[in-house]
Image: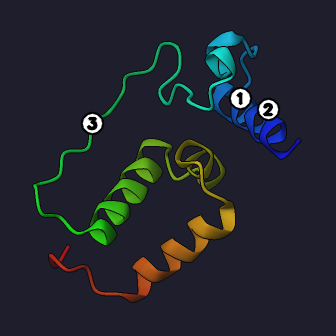
């Protein structure tokens, strides 16, 4: 039941008021879903080999938040994380100095 609820919630958020079509739903019962959706470009995040997992997560979350124009619910849905996790990470990033001085 939780998985169905998550699929419906994600489709609702990502469709941004447009009709929800099969484009927004998992294919063949798969949990994989389109991130960019119809008519959207798919931004790419490139990281150098050897980047720590924590730094990769940080950059991915912040880039996704930027891509979603600071819309936190949409960011959490795209990343497949809870709002609580997103808020916790953003709080951590605000209090910790960035390792590369950014």
Q: Which residue is mark 3?
A: 44
Residue 44, position in %: x, y?
27, 36
Compare residues 35 and 68 and report the one nearer the observer.
Answer: 35
Look at 69% across and 22% down and name the residue there. Answer: 29
- For residue 33, what is the image quadrant? top right
Residue 73, position in %: x, y?
66, 51
**Which corner quadrant holds the C terminus?**
bottom left
Q: Which mark is residue 11?
A: 1
Compare residues 17 and 6 and report the one nearer the observer.
Answer: 6
Q: Which residue is mark 2?
A: 8
Residue 81, position in %: x, y?
60, 56
Q: Is residue 99 left or right of residue 94?
A: left
Label 3 SS? loop
**Which corner quadrant holds the N terminus?**
top right
* CB contact under 8 Å: marks 1 and 2: yes
The residue lying furthest to the right in this view is 1
Residue 63 in the image: above or below residue 25: below
Label 2 SS? helix
Q: Mark 1 and mark 2: span between their CA atoms?
A: 5 Å
Residue 21 in the image: above or below residue 40: above
Q: Mark 3 and mark 2: span between their CA atoms?
A: 26 Å
Q: Residues within 10 Å of mark 3 (few under 14, many from 20)?
A: few
- For residue 50, what is the image quadrant? bottom left
């Amino acid at each position: 039941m939780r998985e169905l609820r998550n699929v419906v919630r994600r489709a609702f958020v990502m469709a941004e008021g447009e009709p929800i079509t099969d484009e927004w739903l998992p294919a063949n019962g798969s949990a994989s879903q389109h991130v960019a959706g119809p008519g959207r470009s798919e931004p790419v995040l490139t990281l150098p080999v050897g980047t720590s997992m924590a730094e990769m997560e940080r950059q991915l979350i912040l880039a996704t938040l930027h891509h979603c124009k600071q819309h936190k619910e949409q960011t959490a849905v795209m990343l497949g994380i809870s709002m609580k996790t997103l808020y916790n990470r953003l709080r951590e990033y605000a209090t910790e100095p960035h390792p590369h001085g950014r």
